Every structure is written in structure tokens, then in C-alpha cells.
Image: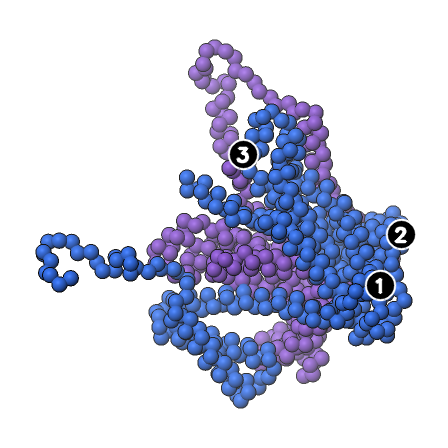
Chain colours: A purple, B blue
Amino acid sequence: MSLFDLWSSTDDPTEETPLVDDEPRKEITPSPAPVDRAFRGATRSAAVADLVIMGLIGTFLFIRAMPAWHKAGWSFFTEQEWLPESGRFGIGAVLFGTILIALIAMVIALPLAVGTAICISELVPDRIRRPLISLIDLMAAIPSIVYALWGFFFLQPRLIHVAQWLSVHASWFPPFKVPSGESASAYASSPFIAGTVVSLVVIPLVCSLTREVFSQAPQGEREAALALGSSQWGMIRTVVLPFGKGGLIGASMLGLGRALGETITVYAIISPIFSRSTHILETGGNSIAALIAIRFPDSDSIGIAALMAAGFVLFMLTLAVNTFAATIISRSRSGALTEI
Amino acid sequence: MTTVTAPRTTVVPATADPEREVRRRPGRMDEAAWWTVLGAAAGSLGMAWLFVERLLPLSGRLGFLLVWYGCFVLLYLVASAVQATGESIGDRLAVVACRTAGAGVLGALVTIVGYTFFRGIHALRPSFFTQTMGSTGPTNPLTQGGIAHAMVGSFEQVGLALLICVPLGVTAALYLNEVQGPLARVIRAVVDAMSAIPSIVAGLFVLAVLILTLGVNRCGLAASIAIAIEMLPVVTRASEVVFRLVPGGLREAGLALGSSHWRMVRDVVLPTARPGLVTAILLGIARGIGETAPVLLVAGFTSDMNADPLHHAQVSLPLYIFTYVKYPQHTMITRAYGAALALLIIVLIAFVTARILGGAPPGQLTRRQRRRLERAENR
């Protein structure tokens, strides 16, 4: 029962409320002017247009994928090969690859993004905070094709050595095993490198969202913690982080949604294979988005339908992840008006 | 004081002397802390050299840096353990980890921008912005060929996308924040979900509707519709936040003067929010101009100038980069980097203009607004 309900229930005309004089109560029903009705109608239709576009995207992808659904049936979700011409195609391998690369990206991005967010919102002096915020926002605005170029030409040659070192000295951890040998080329174009580049695309998004939540932690509680003798990190651990937990989860889910759909960076790095490989340091992997970009130019009509089906699955996946994230974030959103 | 004071008078403790009391700043590093960090850094440099060059099977600059960092954390912990007690050692470690994360992210940003700059600067010359690739082959020298057609394509596609998504996005934001109709919660959730649509899915959608169903040929307009789908949630959310920052008192003043809702929105809300709206649009541009995946599917590729977005293939900057970077020739890769640098500069200009006009990024209060809020809270 909201405050409004309480209020209206006491205003109930059946209750005995002392009236001033015996005048009948005046009913005020707002009747918007025609121009207002038009204004509301116009804004409503623009808002509904968003809804319609989302619906259309799902519907059209689904309809255009019909031939593929018919041909592949339920095996579409388990089949690992991608040979639409011969009727054997499915997202068994690429869906796995999509999630694998996104998870690698999140494992790298989360600590870096949250650390940076804490650093910016709590640790740096006030005067360099705003420039740093601008830099992170600028990082979010850099096109992913630039990340892809940088990842391929700058980062990959350096990361290969790290991957090699990991596979030699940490191969007791199963995903770090590289069965295909010792040469440096066996470590190029791996899910690990693709995930690292994707993580850099995701970091600014997660960082700016979490920083915003952290900076909203109540000032009074911060000061209370410090006044009780807590160190600065103690204050962060006991006040800021618990306060920002919801936003942190939501932001990382949003980042995951972004990582799942990242196309160009994965396309630039990965060398496509069609099997489920858990050796993340070894050459070869795939993701749905990269598959669409790679296979699109040489696809015939059934091939396009199959790509539409893959796109539909990716759409539903990101939609689910994102709706979940949005519900979490909206619970921790402060939506109050600014008052003067 | 040399005289003996009377036994019953109150003696003010010496530390309460306001001249000598130093303000405590939690988290601010004092001189000892600085020396600890410097000492640990110097010591770990030596240790790292010893490990990398003499003891461990490691090599390379990156390996050296990683080992140096590991040694630094170790030494810093030991030094802290000598100086301080249990709790604060963990604190220092956490703070160092956070600062490292921040420095790492900043370092990545610097190398991304710097690397693109140094690779691309060789291609940039005035003719690079005025010529097309129409008569330039992969083996031609860098003095020939350019990105004129790609820039025209990019600007036209983003311009058309703006024509589609700005009216739609700003009006939808008005619905969310000014009308606050019954659907607002649902729409807000949908817009949030829309911002996560992978750009390749937006491209597939336009492909499915325009090209496969309606039979339109690949053209700039198809690309701009896909870009508009990607920009729409950015513009909607950013302008909604801007509208939320318009003081409620102004709205009530407008309504109290007897204006209609629409009149109030037109004469009060929109003018107040104008700089913020420009910021929202510029952020949308920065997002839209870099979209590669949808353009790849629906715009087609050409090396000639095509200023007509309605017919025939039209290339844009991301697609230009994407295509030419796959050539084996060094000159083509340099051209791609030149285009990437141009793209980066355009994004930077849009971004800096947005900052200057908007003052603060949408969703964040300016210093003045924050101070005003604080004053209101303290009242």
C-alpha cells in the first residue's frame, strides 16, 4: 500500500469526515487541452515505436530463419558443424565459443573495471577526478574497429608470449593446456586473446556504471565509518562496496551482454573453428557474432536463413542477460527529480 | 611556563593547541608512505632484473614488467608489515591493487590512442582527405588514394541516422520523463534492453526487412537505419537523464502560470535541457560513426565516391578500415590506420564538443548543481 493509497482512502467520501460548511465536495477532474492530448499521443507513439522496433527485430529474424528451423530442427542447438548447403549446421560450437569468450572477457574486465571505479571515485584527489571520468567515457566512445586494429597488431604479438608462458608453467590448470605444440603460432588467434581485446571494450562500460553507483554511497555513512577509526579501505569495504553491490552486479551483467555481441574485435582476432574447445590459449574459437560476419559474404539463401537463426539466438541471449541486468540496476536507481 | 601553577586549575592538553594540530586526512599518503612506495619500487626493480635476467626462464619486456610488479607488491607488503599492524597491511594491498587497475586501464587507453596515432600519421596528408580509392591499387604509393568517399559516406549515413533517431529518441524520452505514462516502466526496460542489441543483429534485421523482404539494394540508407537502431537507445537514455536534471520547480512555475503541458515542455523543459540534448546527440554520433558490423552487412563496398545514399553501395570509414586492413600490402594497412586515425579524431571532436557544451556528462551533476544539492540537504 503506497502513501498515495493511504491518502486517498482517508479522502473516501463514505467516511465521516468533518466538512467545512455543508458545501458539497468539488470534484476536480483534469481534462487536458487538445494540444496536450496531441502532445501526449505523439510522445506515447514515439515510445511505443521503440517497443515495436524491438518486436519487429525479433519477429523478422525469426521469420527469415524459418527455412533454417525447418531444415535443422532441434539439432540446430547441438550440431557443431556449419555446412548449411548440406543441411548440417548448428550453433553447438559457436554458442559455446560465444559464452567462453564473453566469460574470459568478463574475468579480465571485472577486476580492472571495479578497481578503476574505486580508484576514481574514492582514491584519487578531487581535482583529477573529473578528467579521469572524461577519459573513461572517451574510452567508451572509441569505435570497436580501433580496438580490433590495436588488438591484432599491438596486443596479440605481446600476449602470445604471456600465453606461451602460462601454458608451459600453469598447464596443471586444464584450460591452459595447449596440445598442439610449442611454436608461437599455436598461441595466436586464441579465445584468450580475443577475450582480452573484448574485455577492453567492456571495461569502460562497467567502470563508468559502477563508479556512478559507488559515488552515490551516502556521505554520512562514509564519515561515520571514518569517524569510528576505519581506514580508507575499511570504509570502502564496509560502506561503499555493500552499497554498490546491486549496481555492481547489474553493471557486470550489462558488460556481459555487450561482450556476447561484440563482433569486429572477435572477427579480427579469432581463427574460426567449429568444435567445442576448452583450451583457451590455443588457436581457434568462434562466436555467433563473428560467425555471422565471417560467413555472410559467401552464403546462399539457406545459409542466410541459418545466419538469421543464429542471430535470433544471439538476440534472445543478450535480451535475457540485459533484461536481468536492467531489473537489478533499476532497483538501485535514484530517480528523484532535481529540485530548486 | 616556569612558575608552578595552582593545583586545582584545569590544564589544557598540549595537543589541543590549534597551532600545532594537524588535520588528519584518511587515505592521504604522508612522507613515510611515499618513501615506502619508492623504496619498494627501487628494490623490486633490482629483484626483477635478477629474476628475469639470471634466474627464471622468462624474457621480454612484458614479462619483466609483470615480475617487477609482483616483486613490488611483495616488498611493499613486507615494508608495511614492518611499519604497521595486521589490518592496515591488507588495506594497503587493496589500495595498491585498485591503483594498479586504474593505471592499467589508463595505460591501455594511452597505447590504443598512441598506437593508432603513430601508425596512421604516415598516411595523413591533405590529399588523403580529398581523394578516393577509385584509381588506386594496393601497390600504389601512399601519396595516392584517400578516404574522401568514406568520409562522405560516414557523414551521410550518420546524418540520416540522426534524422531518424533524434526525433524518435527525444520524444520517447519526453514520454518517459515528462508524460510519465503508464507504459514508462516497460518502455524504459525496453530501451535498456535495446542498448544491448549486438550491432550485427541490427544489421541482420535491416537485411531481413529492407533487402530480403522489400527488395531494396544495398545502399547507404540501409546502413543508416541499422546505425539509427544502435543510436536510438543511447540518445533516448541520455536525453531522459538530461530531462531529469531540469529542476521540477521550473516545471511547476510554468504550469502555475497557466500554460498547457505542451507549452510548458516547449518553453521551459526543452530550452533548459538544450545543451544537454546536444550532448546526448553528440554521444549518439560518437557511437554511430564507429559502427562496423551492420555496415558490413547492408551497405556494400565500393572504392569510388558515391554521394547518393539511396542507390548503390556506399562505403563508410569503419568499413574502409575493415576492408583495407586485410590486404597484405603495407601501404594498404597504413591507409587503414590513417582512416582509423581520422575516425578517432572525429569521435574525439564530437566527444570534446559534447563535454564543452554539456558541461557535465548526462547523469552527472555539475559542480554547481552538486553544491546546490548539498546546500539543500544541509538546510
Q: Quadrant of residue A187?
A: bottom right
Indicate left or right for B121 with B245 as reference. Answer: right
Query: Could you tell me which residue is drawn at 55 percent across and 77 percent down?
Result: B66
Residue A38 vertical position relative to residue B289 in the rendered view, above or below: above
Query: Could you tell me which residue is drawn at 85 percent across and 61 percent down?
Result: B301
Task: Name the amino acid, label 3.
Answer: Gly
> Which quarter of the rendering shows the C terminus of chain B?
top left
Query: Could you tell me which residue is drawn at 47 percent across and 77 percent down?
Result: B41
Count of labels in the image:
3
N-term mark: 2 or 3: 3
Instruction: Give SS at disc 3.
Output: helix
Q: Which residue is mark 2?
A: B311
Q: Chain of mark 1?
A: B
Residue A236 vertical position relative to residue A193 in the rendered view, above or below: above
Q: Which label number is shown at residue B249?
A: 3
Task: Name the amino acid, label 1.
Answer: Gln
